[in-house]
Image (cartoon, grey):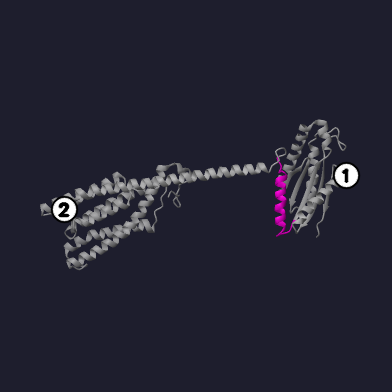
Amino acid sequence: MIVMWKRGKFTVSDFLDEKKLTKLEILKHNIQKISFISKISTIITVFLVLIISLVSKKSFFNADRNIIFHITPYAVLILFNIVVYFITDIKKIRITEQNMKRIDIFISFYVITLTLLGALITINDHEYYIQLMIYTLILFITCSVIVLRVQQLLISMILSSTTLLIGLYLQSDDTALFNQQILYLLSLLPITFFISQSFYFSFHRSLNFQSELIKEAHLTRELTKKLREANRKLELQANLDPLTNLFNRRAYDKYVADLEKKASHESFMFTAIMVDVDCFKLYNDTYGHSEGDRVLASIGHQLFELAYKYGCFASRWGGEEFAILLINHSEEMANKICEEIIDKVKELQIDHSTSEILPIVTVSVGANTNVIQHPYEVQYCIRKADEALYYVKENGRNYYEHRQSVEV
């Protein structure tokens, strides 16, 4: 129901402006109905002119002055409807915040003009119609399909009915007939007023009901969005290591499984890098586990920064070991990352007086690069990286070993 008018100027913030939106919907409805009435009214008018011409047995082009007078109001009504049709259907009225007032005036003008023309036609040809048929028909159609405020309705009814009564009074030679016409109008006007207001309030209730539905739908979407965001955060937390803020082993296993699925339908360059903190047990024994946790958190932060910089996956593999996985990175880039890992940890300058390597915390790194063409090769590459790490730990530590199994 409440949607943004094409090429209009309404934004999402206007959802809270119910009065503006209600007025917009009423204007849109009225413009559509005016377009419809102008078409139907033109068809009915042409049909009546033909019928009256046949009944009166007078040609359309008869030069008799009285006949021209009879046809003129119909011609004016047809011309009026053509102009309205041009404005509403051909030119296409676009409703914006700036022209809403002008369109409302146009609708009021249309209703007043249409009912006045109905009154003029009835005055000229009332002898052909039973109980002022044309005026009654136009009034009923106007009041039952166009949403009119009380002021709009009363102005059009007062002007048209007054014009009609004056015209009938001036033309009537039969007082009894004129009295009947007055009684008829006194019955017609309250009925049409009641119909119009009933339709007005019914339309407003419908708008309010649909507005409430939209609000509920909007609220539901917002709640759903927040719930999804909360679930995403929970899922992210479930996949993060709380100490280092890197991905945990659970996330690591899922990522490796996804790589194996990827390998089942395409090949890619894969590098696994395994990182181990040198002499970490000695560090814990010397400084305590809380200080050991701080070391792991500091190293985790450095690995996080490197992962962000190079677009790779970094996780805490277990204990004091970390894993970094690279997709489609060159061997040269893998070497650079390995070197940066070692240098970044040294730059932390974390004291480690009992280390067998240096008086600061250092790390050992093992890496393996391979072109993955089958799912099982992912785990194979990781094992090879772990073997390279083990080799470094057995042969001095504080450096990296990068083994390539890439066939060019």
Label placed on residue 406 = none
Q: Is residue 255 magenta?
A: yes
* Residue 106 is a magenta residue: no
Highlighted range, magenta: 245-268
Count of all numbered marks drawn on residues in the image: 2
Residue 394 disc label: 1
User: For the residue carrying disc 2, how many other residues have a C-alpha within 10 Å: few (<14), some (14-19), or many (20+)?
Assistant: many
* Alpha carbon distance from label 1 to label 2: 117 Å
In the depicted structure, whether residue 50 falls above or below residue 253? below
Amino acid under disc 2: Leu
Residue sitting at the far top: 287
Residue 321: % across, % down: 78, 42
Identify which residue, 164 or 304, lies in the foreground: 304
Q: Position of residue 188 (x, y in %)?
A: 22, 50
Residue 292 in which image quadrant:
top right
| Residue at screen point 51% across, 44% down | 220
